[in-house]
Amino acid sequence: MSFGFWSLIPVIVIIVFALITKDTFISLFLGVATGFIMVAGGNPIKAFNGFLETLTEVMTDDNTAWVLLICGLFGSLIMLITEAGGALGFSRLAERFLKTRTASMIGTWILGIIVCVDDYLNCLAVGAAVRKITDKERVSREMLAYIINSTGVTVCAIIPFSSWAAFMGGLMEKADMLGGYSVSGAYIHTIPYMLYGWLAVICVPLFILKVIPLFGPMKSAERRALDTGEVFSAQTKAQLKALPDEELKFKGKKCRAFNFLAPIILVAVLTVTTEDLLIGVFAALALCFVMYLPQRLMSVKEYFNNIMAGLADMFSMLVIIILSYTLIEVNGQLGLVQFVVDIALKAVNPALLPATIFIVIGLLSFASGSFWGLAAIAFPIVGPLAAALGVNPLLCGGALISAVAFGGHICLYSDTVILTSASTQVTNAEYFRTSAPLVGVPFVLAAIGFVIMGFAL
């Protein structure tokens, strides 16, 4: 069943209430409730039953379990690293090189490029590594979140040995979009066409260096941090627990950067070799046990208490992830994706197809909160359409991958925004409010670029 234009209503409800309440959970809950009430034809009992059934499906889905384990256990890993003094040790090491405000932000950008194996790893690890340094240099947490998310997702997309490359390359093969290349070869040849990814990564240092002046809410956030030293917004600070003074806690103790670097490097290496981030996280937790206990950084009891504390810290994020996946399901029941694709893609000028793919799928990714799921739906449509219209399949593939990467930057209930917000300790709503205008710059430039490439190639 398709609700046509009305399928957009839950998304509109979420955006409006996010801007009004600045609360991600309330906004998501109201959007999900609206969707199920629409599906149930206004019957509240039927809507509640539909919600419970869908929630059960989401919670028992293998992919959901994998994501929840990754996010929860990564919270445990960050807690262990922090309590062992590893995060502080890394910060002190980095402070030797990142001695100015600009250098701290550029260093965050560079670290985001280096940790390019997986977007989840990138979002969580980089924030934990640098937030103490950027706090000292009076960089707002909103700006830090923008730098991390606008670097991490896109770098993972444009690197041919990341989790993105494996997944998207497989979809291109199924959609017959390899253009005569192998899966890896086709993905590598698609990378130059990922305009949004390149522009998003390049725009970060341009904003940092003020080549492109900051504007909108982000400019106000940065002015607040510079003038008052307050790196958190009032809304975010109200939701934070009291944060411990790490310098005081570890006074007189040797904090080793190696205790941070070794587990993170192990996660990265095993993710590449096994193609499963979960294996890497479990191995890193085991390595922490082997490393930290002989150094007397914690006892066996403290080790397991820290694992539980890390899981507890991530609980609110895990709830938001579950709600976001439930929203994706109810959007499917409303026929949101099919409505937009049918209207926008199937009656388009061949030269405008790449730009249309980028804009339509990008906005749909923003609305639905789905990247890989949306890509799995869109590639089988885009591949035959590109072939029928005689458009370069690699260009169309680059436009589609760019589109879902954009969704990961802008959607306040997407996985990467949720994890970046957790890592930088800002609310999803504050991230969206401050970062959306900046993310709009590479989006507009990429749309123009795809129009030009559509006519030129």
Image (tube, rainbow, N blue to C red):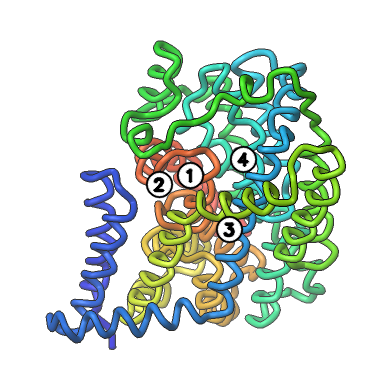
Query: From the viewer's perspective, is 319 left or right of 146?
Result: left
- Measured in 3D between alpha carbons, the distance from the residue under mark 4 to the one under mark 3, in whole angstroms, is 24 Å
> In the rendering, which numbered label is found on residue 428?
2
Of the pair 178 and 92, the residue shown nearer to us: 92
N-terminal label among 2 and 3: 3
- Measured in 3D between alpha carbons, the distance from the residue under mark 2 to the one under mark 4, in whole angstroms, is 21 Å
- Measured in 3D between alpha carbons, the distance from the residue under mark 4 to the one under mark 1, in whole angstroms, is 19 Å
N-terminal label among 2 and 4: 4
Cβ atoms under marks 3 and 1 closer than 8 Å: no
Cβ atoms under marks 4 and 1 closer than 8 Å: no
Describe the element under mark 2 as helix, strand or loop. helix
The residue lying at 81 percent from left, 30 percent from top is 256
Can residue 398 be seen here? The reply is yes
Cβ atoms under marks 1 and 2 closer than 8 Å: yes
* Nearer mark to the viewer, of 4 and 3: 3
Describe the element under mark 3 as helix, strand or loop. helix
* Nearer mark to the viewer, of 2 and 3: 3
* Residue highlighted by disc 1: 421
Around disc 1, counting alpha carbons within 10 Å, would you say few (fewer than 14), some (14 to 19), or many (20 or more)?
many
* Residue highlighted by disc 3: 71
Q: Amino acid at mark 4?
A: Val
N-terminal label among 3 and 1: 3
Q: Amino acid at mark 2?
A: Asn
Cβ atoms under marks 4 and 3 closer than 8 Å: no
> In the rendering, which numbered label is found on residue 201?
4
Q: Is residue 379 above or below residue 161?
A: below
Q: Amino acid at mark 3?
A: Cys
- Measured in 3D between alpha carbons, the distance from the residue under mark 2 to the one under mark 3, in whole angstroms, is 16 Å
Of the pair 404 and 422, the residue shown nearer to us: 422
- Measured in 3D between alpha carbons, the distance from the residue under mark 1 to the one under mark 2, in whole angstroms, is 6 Å
Q: Amino acid at mark 1?
A: Ser
